[in-house]
Image: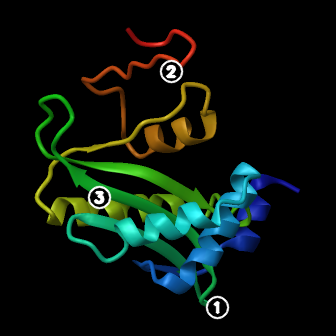
Amino acid sequence: MSTEAQSSENTGKFSIRGAQTSDIVAVTGIDTRITNLSKPDYWTDMFERYGNRTNRFFLVAENENTTVIGFTIGEVRAWEFGSKPCGWIFAMGVDPDNRLNKVGSTLFDAMCDRLTSAGVDTVRTMLARDDELNMTFFRAQGMMGGPFIQLEMPLGQGGGK
C-alpha cells in the first residue's frame, strides 16, 4: 500500500488545545511508540512544569473521537549566552498512525502562534544530527541552522577540569 493511500485512509479532522492532566497517559503512549521507552514520570513532570503556565506551552492534537494523536512543548527563553528572548520547541511527537496528516505541521504552527503572542519573533529547536525524521520535519517547516553551536563533553572519568 502506498504512503498516499495510507495517508488518505487516516486523514481526519483534529484540533489543537492545551494539555490537561488526563492527557499524560496518551502522551506517554505516543512517546513510548516513538522511542520504545515508557517515561510516565517524565511526562507528568513536563505537564507540571509546562502545562498552563505563562510563556510555557504544552499542546496536544485531538481527533474527532477525542483521542490524543500528537503533542508539542515549548517556551520562551532569554538566557542562552546573550540570546534575545526567543521561542524553543523541545518536544514533539505524533502517533505513527497519524503521520503525513498535517498533525505535526499544525502543532508546529499552533506553537509558533503562541510564541508570537508571547512576544518573540524567532523559534529554535535542537536535534541530533542523525535524527533524519525530525530534521526533515523541521526543515520542511522552514527552520534552518541558526547562529549558535551546541558543545558537549562527557562527565566523570576525567571529564571537565
Quarter of the figure that contains the N terminus: bottom right
Label 3 sits on a secondary structure element that is helix
Q: Nearer the viewer, mark 3 or mark 2?
A: 2
Mark 3–mark 2 contact, CB under 8 Å? no
Expressed as whole percent of the image width and height from the top left, the position of residue 3 reads 76, 54
Q: Label 3 belongs to which residue?
A: 112
Q: Is residue 10 left or right of residue 73?
A: right
Q: Quadrant of the C terminus?
A: top left
Q: Nearer the viewer, mark 2 or mark 1?
A: 2
Q: Is residue 35 visible?
A: yes
The residue lying furthest to the right in this view is 1
Which residue corresponds to mark 1?
Answer: 65
Nearer-the-camera pick, 5 or 125? 125
**Residue 48 percent coordinates (x, y):** 41, 72
Which numbered disc, 3 or 2, marks the residue that appears first in the sequence? 3
Count of number-bearing discs: 3
- Secondary element under disc 2, as helix, strand or loop, is loop
Viewer-side residue, 82 vs 87: 82
Residue type (three-letter) at the residue carrying disc 1: Asn
Q: Residues within 10 Å of mark 1 (few under 14, many from 20)?
A: few
Residue 70 relative to residue 141: left or right: right
Q: Is residue 46 above or below residue 140?
A: below
Q: Amino acid type of disc 2? A: Leu
* Image location (x, y in percent) of residue 38: 71, 60
Q: Earlier in the sequence, mark 2 or mark 1?
A: 1
Query: Residue type at mark 3?
Result: Cys
Residue at the spot 21% in from the left edge and 34% down from the top edge: 80
Considering the numbered disc 1 on the image, is that residue within a helix, a strand or a loop? loop
Q: Is residue 102 visible?
A: no
138 horizontally vs 35: left or right: left
